[in-house]
Amino acid sequence: MVTTSGPDRRDTGTAGRKAPVTLREFVDRLPETPHFRVEVVNGRVIVSPLSSPRHSWIVALLVEAFLPAARTRGWRVWPGLEVCASWSGEPLVPDFAVGPRDAPRWGEREVLSDGLVLVAEVVSAAGAREDREDKPHVYARGGVPLLLVVDPETEPGSVTLHGDLAYGRYQTVTTVEMGDKLLIPPPIDVTLDTAILLDA
């Protein structure tokens, strides 16, 4: 496993310290936020409350759906994983991630984005723009091969897969209505029956 040195966000002392120069430095100096998630998305610090029951249940269903494929390959499945964007060093917290157990780390708490195989975001009403429009660009630039966006806020609900990563962009975007089947290509290579998400 590769570990890159990263800051300890719990260090909130300010004596003799200069003001933060980057958003990363600003976020790293925030106190612990156990009831919120803090991310930097397209130059904005986003502070969000923890998930609603429906949101959390969708994440649990994704874990259940991807866990067999992950176990077969010796990978890990992480809900709410702290991620460091490889190209910018900025923090992200996808709702769900899949990657090898020895994916490169940034410090003790974060996995580097280009060490992951797939991340997923579940769209919430408050963060719809970030999840639908901004994060696909952020994850593509961060080298994540596959991005799954589950959108229960549309009518009907939808599931979108961004894939074929090349030159920092996803070349294909496939959207299905929630309830249909969606092929998740290699290296995961499973068919996701999105009907399981209708239960949410």
Image (cartoon, rainbow, N blue to C red):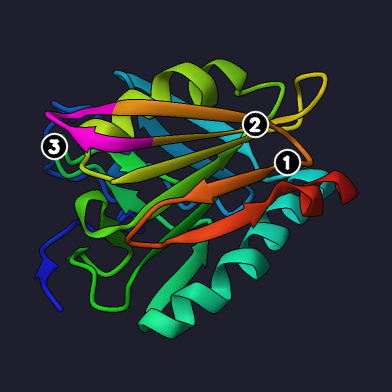
Residue at the image point whose x is 22% and y is 39% from the top:
142
How packed mark 1 is, by other alpha carbons closer than 10 Å (few <14, some 14-19, many 20 or more), is some
Q: In this view, does 153 lie to the left or right of 102?
A: right
Front in this rendered view, residue 26 or 134: 134
Q: Identify the mark at residue 176; answer none if there is no mark.
A: 2
How packed mark 3 is, by other alpha carbons closer than 10 Å (few <14, some 14-19, many 20 or more), is some
Q: Identify the mark at residue 157; answer none if there is no mark.
A: none
Q: Quadrant of residue 127?
A: top right
Residue at the image point whose x is 33% and y is 51% from the top:
83
Residue 118 in the image, given as x and y percentages of width and height: 39, 52
101 magenta-colored: no
Secondary element at image label 3? loop
Pair 2/3: label in front: 2
Let me know if residue 85 appears in the view. Answer: yes
Marks 1 and 2: in contact by CB < 8 Å?
A: yes
* Segment tinted magenta in the rendering: 163-170
Secondary element at image label 2? strand
Front in this rendered view, residue 28 or 132: 132
Q: At label 1, which amino acid type do we have?
A: Asp
Label located before the other in sequence (2 or 3): 3
Q: Identify the mark at residue 87; answer none if there is no mark.
A: 3
Marks 3 and 2: in contact by CB < 8 Å?
A: no
Given the current orientation, which residue lies at the most extreme right position?
A: 199
Q: At label 2, which amino acid type do we have?
A: Val
* Residue tagged 1: 180
Mark 2 and mark 3: span between their CA atoms?
A: 30 Å
Q: In this view, does 171 lie above or below 112?
A: above
Label located before the other in sequence (3 or 1): 3
Instruction: Report the number of discs.
Output: 3
Residue at the image point whose x is 11% and y is 33% from the top:
18
Q: Is residue 178 left or right of residue 144?
A: right
Q: At label 3, which amino acid type do we have?
A: Trp
